[in-house]
Image (cartoon, grey):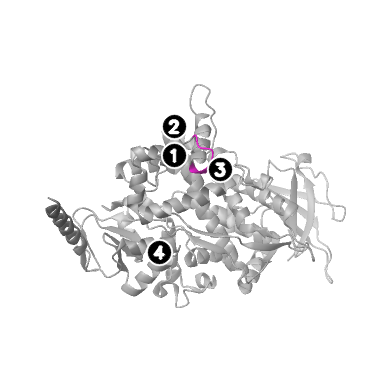
Amino acid sequence: MALPLLTSLLAFILLFALNICHHPGIFPRLWTIISTARNTLHLDHAAVLKEYGPLARIDPNTLITNDPELIRRMNAVRSLYQKGEWYDLMSFTVDRKHLFSETNEERHSALRARMAQGYSGSDLGNAYLEECVDGRLLDLFSLISAKYLSSGSTLRSVDISRLMLYLAADVVTDIAFREPFGFLTADDDVHGYITTQEELLPVFEWFSAIPAMAKLVKNPWIAKYAMPKNTDKAGLGYMLGVAKRTVDQRFGPNKISKNDMLGSFISHGLDREQCEQEAVLQVVAGTDTTVTSLRTITMYIITHPQVYRKLQDEIDKAQLTFPILTDKEAKNLPYLQACIAEGLRIFPPVTGLFCKRVPPEGDTIHGKFIPGGTEIAYGAWNFYKDAAIFGNDVDVFRPERWLEATEEQAATMRKTTDLIFGYGKYQCLGKPIAMLELGKALAEIFRRYDISLVDPLKGWKCYNRNATALNPKQLQLRTLRKLIPRRHFLAQINSSNMVIDSLQIGSSTSSSPKLRQASKRNGVYWFTKPRLPPVSGPPEEDQARVQLQPRHDIVTIFFPYR
């Protein structure tokens, strides 16, 4: 009895494996397990693709690709490809799925349609998204000024990776619930989020490497003890509890209505349990990927002096809104945008496999037939290092490539790096928020501070978490306030003494010339001041603009000198 069963099982495995054996690559899953244990899965996948070509085997039923056209074809809106088993392993609970883990195409499309308005800002308006980001940036700068500014021989170093995590978490919770969790104001992991993150990502990583482990843990008998519950006092279960309590306030006879992202989800038909799942997904996914990009782009800029100088020069010369520049202004800083694009290219923040399942009838790729049910993964790490697209120096951080390229080359480069956020029916809904936050945060950090590594010989610690993102940590910086004036004249006014329409000046610094109101255009207040006489020539006038922040009484205005 046992022998026929064993023979049948071996025959099935061989038949299934031989279907894709004509694709070279690594066969045993043990290879994936070892690579995961070493935290080098992204590098090992890149090596496989480099050795075996743009479509290689990484386990008996999984291929991996770094072909942009294949990714677009699989993810296209009308594609017959569907999410693979990898996504199913990302659920937070046994009986509920969220937008990311939902593998049923019909349910995924319906859920995505109901959530799109909230993520895009269509329901809330871009001004709401900017206000949330601006307020949290001001919290960050207040914290740095109070505790982490060095001066002269006084060193007050800061792990900027930690503060950037606080920033990203406060931004996403402010957007989602109209109330930040308060990491920055407390300068602490007030809800145990960092602990949760460090516990959660390795679990998803191993689930991805060993799907059988995830299935075992999600067995109803085992899940009762192993899976997180919203009554837990720590970890993912605690986050589920926070989400439940927040969502409970929005339902029932005494429900609270707010014009925030959660309110948008509710207005478009998400039920209570769906809102709980999506709230946790927002915090986990919306924080980790953005903070990884903030950390890595900052690291690359400060370790490339010529890039650092060029970026600060562009920011210093621009006439930008204070206290925080607008999203439109950030997008109109070409070198800043080149730095962001180059940072995303050379160090993609998401390295998950994002496997898609070949439709039942199979498919022909690169001239070879792929049987239905085969899964094709995304090889992130060398996906954006194709010399034919980005040039021969693909391993070098060089933002100039984006400005030197022809219009056609730049379009191809952008089209390729946009795949970091997915494509088509699986494109990340949070992309607009992430790009808004990156532009504003990076511009303001380098506008306000001169920063450097405390010890250049001690770089960051970087761990690959296959389920979500690369996680760089412990980036110790020395932060100095940029010299003022540095092409700028500083004045302060008290916004509480201003009338919105007539805008009366309340006070100015004792050393400043008297300020005069110039005009109000598009919600931005413009002021003029007498310009200090140059060495020769008549005095001139200069202008500065400031966007008033309702939550902050003191507004700082910088008048740029040309």
In front: mark 4 or mark 3?
Answer: 4
- Disc 1 or 4, which lies upstream in sequence? 4
Specify the amino acid type for callout 1: Gln
Report the residue at 54% width, 35% height from top: 259
Q: CA distance from mark 1 to mark 4?
A: 31 Å
Q: Is residue 528 left or right of residue 317?
A: right
Residue 190: x and y in percent read 62, 43
State the extent of the magenta-drawn residues as a range: 231-236
Magenta region, mostly helix, strand or loop?
Answer: loop
- Disc 1 or 3, which lies upstream in sequence? 3
The residue that mark 3 highlights is: 173
Task: Report the front residue among 413 and 451.
Answer: 451
Q: CA distance from mark 2 to mark 4?
A: 39 Å
Q: Secondary structure under badge 3?
A: helix
Specify the amino acid type for callout 2: Arg
The residue that mark 2 highlights is: 272
The residue that mark 1 highlights is: 277
- Disc 3 or 2, which lies upstream in sequence? 3
In front: mark 1 or mark 3?
Answer: 1
